[in-house]
């Protein structure tokens, strides 16, 4: 149980929030509200799946917000050229993967710290897009693009199935595939993983590529909900995503965490803000409260890992 | 020369039950260069740490300039004028020479105005007294290694050092740079500074030292006048102990050459032109001083610092090794020296550590079969007698000996034909140590070729069929089990070529 300590604390927090809401604002659990909540948080969840892998290997990617904006605009432009929505979606994922590959190559092979690389791509890509679009939004999208040509009632189901399948597949792979084991080993101790024959550089590269592709997917699922695609989408997305992953118990130093934790982190941070509105508090408190939750989560995590280190340290002195 | 400036009397120190110093007495005169020599692990660095206050002695007294130092710590030692210069200068590379000197000497009150002119002037004077001329405004990162050492010496002079300890100061210097360092030492001596000089280079010691004290197994064996002692005697004194431990070595019928290096070199790792061969069933010991390139050789073979010249043959077939995965695919296993940093992953459980180097063994189509994985771990826990509640325990919670056994099981799980062990029993308790030795013999009997790097001469002599001695990234000589003695291994390691050396 100790192993899932953080996940359990987050689950308890979500449950507590749910109980309060059930009594104080039962309207919160209406089908419409839940559907809205899910759709607005789905991009965060999808990107967080990739971010979990990035953080597990001991790296970070703060450029996802800019990649998100580029992929959304690209999907719209491609769809307007008369390409079917699914192909446009695939193209957006490929563009995301290519931008992820740029990040990954600089981090893994040129060996620049990931925070530096992705900070640079965050601003460069964002301003590159602004220059290319001159700030214009993509409008007059074809009918087949919006809601993927589905009805507004069916679309959330498709989005839900996609998210659940993605989370389940990556979570399962992380636990059961050799590649998942390699991710944990690299994040725990990259040097030792390398001695054990793991191609740590290639692994880090691929994790960035995968996260880029997922960011493209998230951008498309977000874009189809509106009749225009803003060229400034995804501002601050990176912070929401990283916060959710960290709140979910993934150690920012790498090597420890789980997909379940990330899902719980997304749920907690995604519900807490709207819940305030439902409880009649000013929405201005949302960001502040999210900050408090993040601080609480990382403090608990830090104390936990210190206690664990102390234990391990004592044991190592026993010969 | 005048009276003693530093006297250590019957200093004893144990680390977790291991006696590093067993009552060492040592005396340094003002204006004297006193060399301290001994094998790896003889207790030199512990003694130095006690003098500089980095480590507290269990018993014994230390006095500086006639005064007993009751409670030594680094700032007390500094105030008394004891300064130390390590092999690697410990300067701040992005600050200038004068700033580095100022940081060491000035009182640290954050609100004091900095007198830049005085700083520069002091730096200039101190560097001049150290016998050099370096622009005080240069960044330390632009200085050569000997220039950095000069800055360290200037810091020591500025702190009014009366005792200057130099730990392998010439290890990274060229011959010309050594000469200029020696002039500085002569200058310091004439100013009455006492110098403790630690080095592995015997020829250099007989030039620079006035007296030589030999440490062995935590005891000061002898102090000799440097002018009248010869190198053979020094080596004799350093070794001088019988091989008392019993090793489970058995003679194994040797098979074909399993592993061969021809002219292997790596500039990055400073390994040059290494040629050797190991037969199936053979244990090749690799001896040499710390820094002689033994670990670097292993890392070159294993693809961590891939070779840029030379060839590697496994079972007669030439192989290319560009990364550890290639080495593993060729049937090479490598248990590295620093097990906590490289050998195991402390945060992961035993089962995950055991399977890590060959996950394909316990997985089907990339999918890990956790039952097979647990069974693999359980097999090694039993076979190597790893003391743990279960295979689920994190390796960080195990003792040193058991961690090493986990590191071994990881490589045994890959069923290697060649196993490279770097300091396999360092920091391992006596019981685990002999178990690991027993295991090595068993593996050799099953036809494995083993390369064992060790700093412990009894282990090298007790376990090896042949012994390769390294010096400066090269093979200084290869000795057979019959001809190998502690004396001729050390002679090769120190570069004193009087012993029968047979080049490969």
Image (spheres, rainbow, N blue to C red):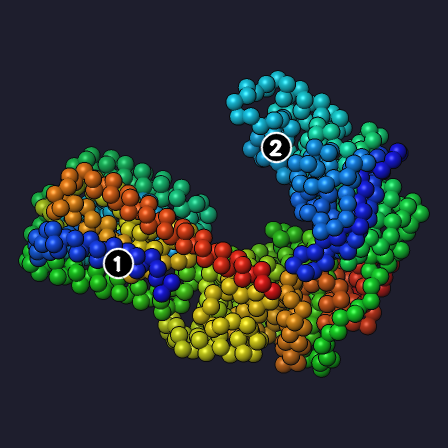
Q: B24 or B481: which is nearer to us?
A: B24
Q: Chain of mark 2?
A: B
Q: Position of residue A181 (x, y in %)?
A: 41, 65
Residue A9, quarter of picture: bottom left
Which residue is depicted at the point 54% across and 59% down? Answer: A314
The residue sitting at the front extreme is: B70
Task: Report whether residue A96 is seen.
Answer: no
Q: Which residue is mark 1?
A: A11
Q: Which residue is painted at 83% across and 31% down in the image?
A: B192
Where is residue A71? Give x, y as percent: 23, 48
Residue A17 at x, y percent in the picture: 20, 53
Q: What distance separates the C-alpha of mark 1 from that of mark 2?
A: 53 Å
Subunit bearing disc 1: A
- Residue at numbered disc 2: B140
Q: In this orientation, does residue B108 appear?
A: yes
Q: Could you classify mark 2 by the number of other residues whose Cα lies within 10 Å: few (under 14), some (14-19), or many (20 or more)?
A: many
Q: Quadrant of the N terminus of chain A?
A: bottom left
Secondary structure of the residue carrying tag 2 is helix
Q: Which mark is residue B268?
A: none
Q: Position of residue B93 (x, y in %)?
A: 58, 35
Instruction: Single out the residue that lies furthest toward the right.
Output: B228
Which residue is drawn at the image coordinates 61% and 70% (left, top)?
B419
Element marked by disc 1: helix
């Amino acid at each position: 149980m100790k192993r899932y300590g953080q996940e359990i604390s987050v689950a308890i927090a979500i449950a507590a929030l749910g109980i309060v809401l059930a009594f104080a604002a039962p309207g919160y659990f209406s089908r419409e509200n839940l559907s809205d909540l899910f759709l607005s948080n789905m991009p965060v969840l999808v990107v967080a799946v990739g971010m979990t892998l990035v953080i597990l290997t001991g790296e970070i990617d703060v450029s996802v917000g800019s990649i998100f904006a580029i992929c959304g605009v690209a999907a719209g432009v491609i769809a307007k050229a008369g390409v079917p929505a699914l192909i446009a979606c695939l193209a957006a994922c490929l563009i995301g993967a290519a931008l992820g590959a740029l990040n990954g190559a600089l981090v893994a092979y040129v060996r620049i710290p990931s925070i530096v690389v992705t900070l640079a791509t965050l601003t460069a890509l964002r301003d590159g897009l602004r220059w290319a679009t001159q700030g214009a939004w993509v409008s007059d999208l074809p009918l087949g693009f919006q809601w993927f040509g589905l009805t507004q009632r069916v679309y959330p189901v498709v989005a839900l199935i996609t998210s659940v399948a993605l989370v389940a597949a990556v979570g399962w792979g992380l636990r059961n595939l050799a590649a998942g084991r390699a991710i944990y080993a690299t994040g725990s101790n990259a040097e030792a993983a390398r001695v054990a024959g793991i191609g740590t550089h290639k692994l880090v590269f691929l994790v960035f590529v995968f996260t880029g592709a997922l960011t493209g997917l998230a951008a498309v699922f977000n874009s189809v909900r509106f009749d225009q695609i803003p060229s400034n989408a995804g501002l601050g997305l990176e912070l929401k995503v990283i916060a959710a992953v960290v709140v979910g118990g993934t150690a920012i130093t790498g090597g420890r965490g789980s997909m379940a934790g990330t899902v719980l982190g997304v749920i907690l941070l995604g519900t807490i803000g709207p819940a305030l509105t439902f409880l009649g508090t000013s929405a201005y408190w949302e960001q502040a409260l999210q900050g408090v939750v993040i601080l609480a989560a990382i403090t608990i995590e830090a104390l936990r890992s210190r206690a664990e280190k102390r234990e391990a340290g004592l044991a190592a002195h026993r010969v | 020369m005048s009276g003693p400036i530093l006297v250590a009397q019957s200093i004893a120190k144990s680390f977790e039950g291991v006696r590093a110093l067993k009552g060492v007495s040592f005396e340094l005169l003002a204006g004297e260069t006193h060399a301290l020599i001994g094998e790896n692990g003889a207790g030199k660095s512990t003694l130095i740490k006690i003098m500089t206050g980095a480590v507290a002695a269990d018993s014994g007294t230390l006095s500086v300039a006639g005064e007993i130092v009751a409670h030594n710590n680094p700032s007390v030692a500094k105030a008394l004028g004891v300064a130390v210069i390590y092999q690697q200068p410990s300067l701040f590379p992005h600050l200038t020479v004068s700033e580095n000197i100022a940081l060491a000497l000035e009182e640290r009150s954050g609100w004091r105005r900095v007198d830049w002119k005085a700083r520069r002037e002091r730096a200039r004077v101190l560097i001049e007294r150290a016998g050099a001329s370096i622009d005080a405004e240069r960044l330390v990162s632009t200085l050569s290694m000997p220039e950095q050492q000069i800055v360290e010496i200037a810091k020591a002079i500025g702190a009014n050092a009366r005792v200057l300890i130099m730990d392998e100061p010439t290890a990274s210097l060229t011959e010309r740079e050594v000469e200029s360092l020696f002039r500085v030492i002569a200058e310091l001596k004439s100013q009455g500074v006492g110098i403790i000089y630690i080095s592995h280079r015997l020829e250099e010691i007989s030039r620079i030292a006035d007296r030589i004290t030999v440490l062995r197994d935590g005891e000061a064996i002898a102090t000799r006048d440097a002018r009248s002692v010869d190198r053979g005697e020094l080596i004799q004194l350093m070794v001088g102990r019988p091989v008392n431990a019993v090793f489970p070595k058995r003679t194994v019928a040797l098979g074909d050459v399993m592993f061969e290096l021809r002219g292997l070199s790596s500039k990055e790792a400073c390994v040059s032109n290494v040629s050797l061969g190991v037969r199936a069933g053979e244990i090749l010991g690799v001896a040499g001083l710390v820094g002689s390139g033994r670990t670097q050789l292993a890392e070159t073979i294993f693809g961590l610092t891939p070779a840029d010249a030379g060839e590697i043959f496994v079972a007669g077939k030439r192989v290319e090794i560009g990364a550890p995965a290639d080495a593993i695919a060729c049937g090479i296993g490598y248990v590295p020296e620093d097990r906590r940093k490289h050998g195991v992953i402390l945060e992961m459980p035993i089962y995950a550590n055991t399977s890590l180097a060959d996950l394909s063994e316990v997985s089907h189509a990339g999918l890990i079969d956790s039952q097979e994985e647990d069974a693999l771990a359980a097999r090694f826990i039993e076979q190597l007698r790893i003391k743990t509640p279960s295979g689920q325990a994190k390796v960080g919670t195990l003792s040193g000996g058991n961690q090493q056994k986990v590191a071994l099981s990881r490589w045994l799980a890959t069923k290697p034909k060649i196993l490279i062990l770097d300091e396999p029993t360092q920091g391992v308790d006596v019981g685990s140590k002999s178990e690991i030795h027993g295991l090595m013999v068993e593996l050799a009997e099953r036809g494995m070729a083993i390369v064992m790097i060790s700093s412990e001469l009894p282990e090298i002599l007790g376990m090896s069929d042949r012994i390769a001695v390294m010096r400066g990234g090269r093979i200084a000589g290869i000795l057979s089990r019959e001809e190998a003695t502690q004396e001729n291994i050390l002679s090769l390691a120190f570069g004193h070529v009087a012993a029968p050396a047979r080049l490969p």
